[in-house]
Image (cartoon, rainbow, N blue to C red):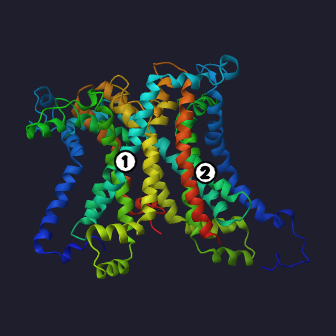
Amino acid sequence: MFPTPIEKRPRAAQITYQALVPLALVMWLLPLIAVALFSIRPLSDFTNGNYWGVPSSFEFFTNYGKVFLESDMPRYMLNSVLITVPTVIGAVALSCMTGFALGIYRFRGNLLIFFMFIAGNFVPFQILMVPVRDLTVDMGLYDTKLGLVLFHIAFQTGFCTLFMRNFIRALPFELIEAARVEGVAEWRIFWFIVLPLMKPAIAALAVLIFTFIWNDYFWAIVLTQGPDAQPVTAGITSFNSQFVAQYHLMSAGSIVAALPPVAMFFLMQRHFIAGLTLGAVK
Amino acid sequence: MTAVTDPTVPRSWMQRNRMTVTPLLFLAPGILFFAVYVIIPIFQSFYISTYEWNGLGELSEQGEFVGLRNYQELMTDRAFEVSLWNNVKWLALYLLAIPAGLFIALFLNQTIAGIRIYKSLFFFPFVLSQVVVGLVFSWFYLPREGLLNAVLGFFGLGSVNVLGDPTLATYGIIAAGLWPQTAYCMILYLTGLNAVDPEQIEAGRLDGAKGWRMLWHVILPQLKPATFIAFVVTIIGALRSFDLISVMTNGGPFGSTRVLSFYMFEKALSEYGFRMGYGSAIAVVLFLIMLVFIGYFLWQMYQDEKSARR
């Protein structure tokens, strides 16, 4: 282990370290802690200039209640769910198939197709913006959740294929060869042998894609407008113009908007990190 | 289970060609989606960039073909120059996330009570949407109410209006972007450190290596895969920066925080006009810059693939 394990250091160093870690954490999360504190203050604190003193009253329920009952936030949240969940399902399903094809079979152009997915997944969004927006308008899907879902599925398939294909490559290939000798049909190999082995990869991808899509902002403002279809990332900006300078409500709204991916991360931490660090360990 | 190997049973076309047909069938939906929404639009953008078009009606009817004139205009466009220059700043400074992430990872790579919780909390900023990060930091920077100035005031320093100052604003936004990006690099290195070979460290210790020398000669070479991924995601992140700029300054003050991705959006899809062709030309330039890095990443991956062939 590097650096030297703290248990092997003098007692004083151990105590210093144990004090330093929480201190560093507070400094690291300072902007966030500030926002959390903003979100439970009453409005009067801001008008009186009491930004950083002790809150004059504790307004957690009033502030968060307003966000849920007197703004469009619940609609935006629902939109985000209705955009994110189908995208996750679609992208994972498509990439299980592409990953299987690219990871198991040897055919000409295999690597080329694989690299096409990787390269496409790296391109800047702006090079796709005008044509994708046009396409969405032409299909009559502008300002609909479906329009966003279709694009997200397509784009995420790039990253997901990279992920799935590498995962499948690491599976024991003998299993598949044995099945072939037994005369098992190819689609049955996929369904009954490979897919069950892919469960950890599917879990990792699902949480990761959930976070990516929930947090997407660019495509939300390019392909949608207004509370009918917009997800919460785009909604929060209009929410902010509705509550200009009402920092307590804006803070509460931002925290609410950020919560689902955060919850997802803490629930599925192991999978999440396994997904992000794919290939970082060899 | 002898049906396939039994030569007396005639095999169908599907059975004979299943090793060719199956991958094609499995690939078809994915490739179709990806081609329609990603691959073809790239080429369409190149095409649109040779037109003057406000996005209404069909390009072939309403647009006017101008050849490379959009690109000519870019060369004398001051705002484009500012954006390009800011992209360079983003690229250079964003890379700080890699050493910063390594530093935090080394700091946290210990076993004390609750260290797992600490690690996850340090990673926390990455899970937040960039929109939320942008909002959080713009309140952090507020001239009167912001925490930054409260802290500066506590130390007896004057206040700064980070986002209102054209010379500071871009750096302020990059700092906000470094926050989640550093967290990402940290988690990559923490995972990498888990896999570092303890025997090599022992061998290094016996050779008298410690501290910097140990880090440089023993640890970092083993962290190479983590560094490569950190480099890839950081470069892509730097060139994709859009959300933070849009949320924190909307390109201002006086256009000083624009980058190519933001300027493209502004030209093509905002109150500044609907110049789809000109916007596409900007996007093409951004794409070509990104292509240099994509080419490098793919080449690296190709080297890996060649050595892993089976």
What amino acid does circle 1 point to?
A: Pro
Q: CA distance from mark 1 to mark 2?
A: 29 Å
Relative to residue A204, is residue A33 depicted above or below?
above
Closer to us: B145 or A74: B145
Q: Are marks 1 and 2 in contact (CB under 8 Å)?
A: no
Decide if residue A72 is in sight here: no
User: Dividing the picture into quarters, in which one does residue A95 lie?
Assistant: bottom right
What amino acid does circle 2 point to?
A: Phe
Q: Nearer the viewer, mark 1 or mark 2?
A: 2
Q: Chain of mark 1?
A: A
Q: Indicate which disc, 1 or 2, sits on the residue closer to the N terminus.
A: 2
Q: Position of residue B198 (x, y in %)?
A: 35, 78
Which residue is at 27% across, 25% downward? A244
Which residue does the numbered mark 1 point to in the structure image? A260
Name the quarter where the N terminus of chain B is drawn.
bottom right
Which residue does the numbered mark 2 point to in the structure image? A117
Which residue is at 49% across, 56% downward? A205
Name the quarter where the C terminus of chain B is drawn.
bottom right
Closer to us: B189 or A142: B189
Q: Secondary structure at mark 1?
A: helix
Residue B301 lies left or right of residue B122; in this view the side is right
Q: Secondary structure at mark 2?
A: helix
Crowdedness near tag 2: few (<14), some (14–19) or many (≥20) residues, C-alpha within 10 Å: many
Crowdedness near tag 1: few (<14), some (14–19) or many (≥20) residues, C-alpha within 10 Å: some
Which residue is at 66% across, 17% downward? B62
Residue A115 lies left or right of residue A232; in this view the side is right
Q: Position of residue A141 (x, y in %)?
A: 59, 31
User: Dividing the picture into quarters, in which one does residue A57 lie?
Assistant: top left
Question: Looking at the picture, do discs 1 and 2 lie on one chain?
Answer: yes
